[in-house]
Image (spheres, rainbow, N blue to C red):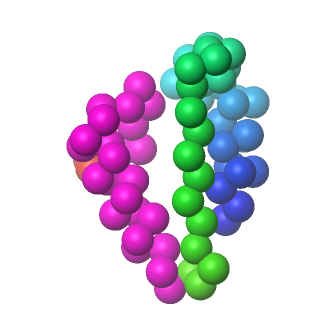
Amino acid sequence: MNSRKRALEHIRDNTAGIMKEICENNDTILILFNVKDSKDIHWVVALEIFFERSINPLIKSDRLG
């Protein structure tokens, strides 16, 4: 999946009711991770979980349950 396309869909859909507000903040940083080979997607998921535990983002991925 194209992470840029998916991120723009979240902005358009105003995910969690705050995505548009977050994107209007000049201090917001969007970091996208992509892999060339789909068999390596587990690295992206591992990073997502690591960052979710480390920085406590406003919108969580819900991968941790």
Q: Do we see residue 17 in this rendering?
A: no
Looking at the image, which residue sits at the far front? Answer: 27
Residue 4 image position (x, y, % from top left): 71, 51
The residue closer to the viewer here, 51 or 1, is 51
Q: Position of residue 24 (x, y in %)?
A: 68, 16
What's the residue at 56%, 33% (across, down)?
29
Please give the range of residues in magenta.
Answer: 39-62
Instruction: Examine the rendering and report whether any part of residue 33 can be seen.
Output: yes
The answer to whether residue 40 is magenta is yes
Q: Is residue 41 above or below residue 44?
A: below
**Residue 18 position in % (x across, y down):** 56, 17
Predominant SS along the magenta part:
helix
Q: Residue at x 62, y 15 (%)?
A: 25
Looking at the picture, how far across and down is residue 44, in whole percent? 45, 65
Taking the magenta stretch, the answer to whether it contains residue 22 is: no
Q: Quadrant of residue 53?
A: top left
Answer above or below: position of 25 versus 47. above
Count every numbered label the image shows and give the total. 0
Q: Quadrant of residue 34?
A: bottom right
Instruction: Locate the N terminus by quadrant.
Output: bottom right
Report the residue at 56% width, 20% height from top: 27
